[in-house]
Image (cartoon, rainbow, N blue to C red):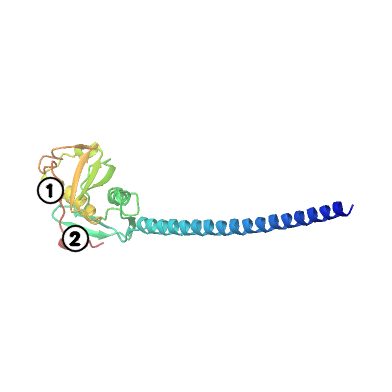
Amino acid sequence: MKSMKGFITTLSFFMILTACGQGDLEEETTIEDGNESEEVNADNDEDNNQEDDQASETNEDELSEIENLIVYFADDELMDIYKMETGETVTDDEGGAKQALNLWIDDENEVATPEGYTTSLPEGVSVQSVSFEDDIAVVSFSEELLEGNFGSAPEVAITEQITMIMEQFGYEQTKILIDDEEVETLYGHIGLDEPIQADSQDDYDELEQ
């Protein structure tokens, strides 16, 4: 009986030690898992911060704008072309360039053609698209632009006004298309097979309203 009691006592002692050992192991494992979780969270926070920085840079690019847009009009005699500040703000991209041309064309918007001046455009002309290709602005108009029975003065005025509006977007040359197709000329006086070079804004007087 004494030997059996001793055996049982010894066995109980070992079981207690084993239980204590497992408890310590579980505690160590929990600590290690906690440390790994903290490291993963730290990595995730760093990745999120990088994504936020990239998003901020993208937003700054998207916010680039042209303030107080300038459009151009010819006088009714087509002797001179004048520049006019509109007070309008457009984005400095292809969409903003198209909006600028629409502001110039459409008398029903905020920028009406002043009395005594003209765009020289035929009725019903619309801007189909604007794209920036290398260092050239490419603008496509509807086929109504070809319907004017004009001489050289209106043709010069139209092409000059278009190129000067595009010049504000950083493009010194503008290619004019009709229905996204190249045409030789509008009215037989200016070739459109090559882009048209813009002048300097400083060459134009302010339009007096």
Residue at (55% x, 57% y) in the render: 36
Residue at (47% x, 57% y) in the render: 48
Q: Which numbered circle lies on residue 201? A: 2
Q: Earlier in the sequence, mark 1 or mark 2?
A: 1
The image shows residue 183 at horizontal and vertical percentages of: 16, 37
| Element assignment for label 1 | helix
Q: Which numbered circle lies on residue 23? A: none
| Element assignment for label 2 | helix
Disc 1 crowd rating (10 Å Cα; few below 14, some 14-19, many 20+) is some
User: Is any atom of residue 116 visible in this view?
Assistant: no
- Which of the two residues, 90 or 104, is positioned nearer the viewer here? 90
Residue at (38% x, 55% y) in the render: 58
Foreground mark, 1 or 2, reads 2
The image shows residue 15 at horizontal and vertical percentages of: 76, 53
* 28 sits left or right of 49 in the view: right
Picture quadrant where residue 172 is located: bottom left
Q: How many marks?
A: 2
* 184 sits left or right of 59 in the view: left
Q: Amino acid at mark 2?
A: Gln
The image shows residue 35 at horizontal and vertical percentages of: 57, 59
Picture quadrant where residue 176 is located: top left
Disc 2 crowd rating (10 Å Cα; few below 14, some 14-19, many 20+) is some
The image shows residue 206 at horizontal and vertical percentages of: 21, 63
- Which of the two residues, 161 or 118, is positioned nearer the viewer here? 161
- Which of the two residues, 96 or 18, is positioned nearer the viewer here? 18
Q: What residue is disc 1 on?
A: 153
Q: Amino acid at mark 1?
A: Ala
Distance from the alpha carbon under mark 1 to that under mark 2: 20 Å
In the rendered image, the quadrant that contains the C terminus is bottom left
- Which of the two residues, 100 or 123, is positioned nearer the viewer here? 100
